[in-house]
Image (cartoon, rainbow, N blue to C red):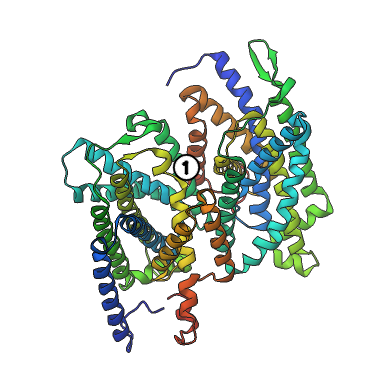
Amino acid sequence: MSGSGARPGQGGAARGALIALLAAVVLLALVPYLFGTYWQQLGFRALQLATLAIAWNLLAGYTGQVSLGTGAFVGLGAYAFALLGNHSAAPLPVLLLAGGAVPAVFAVLVSPGLFRLRGLYFTIGSLALAEALRILMVNLSVFGGASGIVLRAATPPFYALYWLALPVMVLALALVLVLLHSPVSLSLRAVRDDEDVARQMGVRSFRVKLGAFALTAFITGVAGALQSLKLGAIEPYGAFGMSWTIDTVAIVIIGGIATRGGPLLGTLLYVALGESLRGLPELHNAIAALVLLIVIRVAPQGLWGLLLRRPWRRATAAEASDA
Amino acid sequence: MHLPDTVTLLQAAISGLLIGGLFALAALGLSLVVGVVRIVNLMHGELVLLGAYAAWGLVQATGLNPLLLAPLAALAVALLGWPIERYVLQPVARHGEEAPLLTTFALSVIVQNLLVFALGADTRAMDSGPLARRLSLGSVSVPWVYLAGFAIALLVCLAVHWLIARSAFGRRIRAAAENPLDAAVVGVPVRRLYATTFMLAAGVAGLGGALLGMVFAFTPASGVEYLLTGFTVVVLGGLGSVIGTLVGGLALGLVESFAAAFLGDGYRLFAGLVAFLVFLALRPQGLFGRRT
């Protein structure tokens, strides 16, 4: 566990990592000047997926709540953005925040029921909840039913979308990293590793889970709002679709669950894989799932976990299991 | 929302119960796998779906009635189940409980996309021929295929119940479900038993899928629907109890049927999911089951 940060001799490494991160952000911000729309579009997708992966990793990796409800939060964020944008004159940042706030409120509302489910039952419950929400949105004519909603605002050009997605991802990453370097991190992991013991030790497990769940819903919802803005029209099958969940889970597991770099590394690999399979759109998900299957079997800590285990790092077993 | 008349309600109750038998059959394998092999099998829906597609494929090839081909479809899915458990799921079991869960998730995605790739995303349905005719009982009537499906589902559920409660194989299954380590100590071949149980579960799921495919149309994306239906039945009926699963299936059939009658057909599955979530939150051990 390199997360406590205050350990002697680690300050230099942490500062180095921070500088490298900042440099990477500056370089990423320059992408629209240097590359054409293909790369801007690809960059937008990568940033959006990375945002989803960062959020899911917080909930599943560090809090131990393996949710299969990513699609529900993406969909709620996308619909909140579209509805508020069509019925008010709110500026874009407010709309994006609303896209996060609605799923976060939804997460808080369902948590008393959902958190009664422990472990794998939580996973099934989250899947059922997402599916129920999707069916509801298909049937509710108030929200456009199966045909969805068309946004009144014009769709921005790709470079503008990219420049929106970049700060969203960076803020999400910063928020999660700060959280993981704070004392809250210990509560999260305590709940993940043994909820009963954590409670006996005075960790308020319900609040801890609720906080992580709501924050994950918020970040996921903002990424969903970006999708709304990009497409200019949304419908329930796509916005609430399972493929959001598949993408997110595959990215985090392939990159390395409960690792800091896993979501980012996973996104790079996943997007690269997706691009190399452009000629086979039907098989894209099947091959991604096959890669997921193999990674779970041979590298349960993901590829970031494998990198940390290289001899030149000489990480201890504890570090490698929770880096 | 409109208030249906008495005949409609009676009709909904009867067809709901009959369909519920099929739900129970399709969910039985999930109950076995979760209860005995201790894997939360997210590809269960695809096993059911593969049963439906296998029957559909056999109908295309032979032109026979799907009811006659359902056992063959079940056999095909059963034969697929064994290597999946033995060579894909068992090796990841040592990585903790989430690794098998996510592995079954990946498998479900693979099956779903391969079905789209091989057969297209079109909705498929099977013509049950003479069984599509309806049996009239006064003012209500049910298609013969509902009755035939229900009878088969009931027989197979009772057979599996007998197998688990009375046979030597069932005694080993119960021992392994109670405590795999102790079972292994007294000579139960637990790993082989897991693969066999998964195979049995897959076969029953495939049979359920073939029969459901005669009643409802299906697409490569129907797996998640079957999966959640399965979990609803298991949670309503309690884990590891065959009779509980049967009762859970009937209860879900009624809930969905009444929801369709009161709210419209689009809310059929939604009502089932709401029942599932409410029940899961209030009573995770099910109607009959013990807390695990």
Say left or right for B212 vs B222.
right
Residue A266 vertical position relative to residue B163 in the rendered view, above or below: below
Whole-percent x, y for residue B44 in the image: 62, 48
Quadrant where the image shows the N terminus of chain A: bottom left
User: Residue at point 79% right, 67% down?
Assistant: B186
Question: Dot 1 corresponds to which residue?
Answer: A131
* In-front residue for pair B190/A116: B190
User: Residue at point 37% right, 48% down?
Assistant: A73
Say left or right for A59 vs A13.
right
Residue A19, quarter of the rendered image: bottom left
Q: Is residue A199 visible?
A: no
Chain name for mark 1: A
Judge the density around disc 1: few (<14), some (14-19), many (≥20) Cα neighbours within 10 Å.
many
Q: Is residue B83 visible?
A: yes
Residue B107, quarter of the rendered image: bottom right
Quadrant where the image shows the C terminus of chain A: bottom left
User: Residue at point 78% right, 58% down?
Assistant: B172
* In-front residue for pair B257/B83: B83
Residue A118 vertical position relative to residue A14 in the rendered view, above or below: above
Q: Secondary structure at mark 1?
A: helix
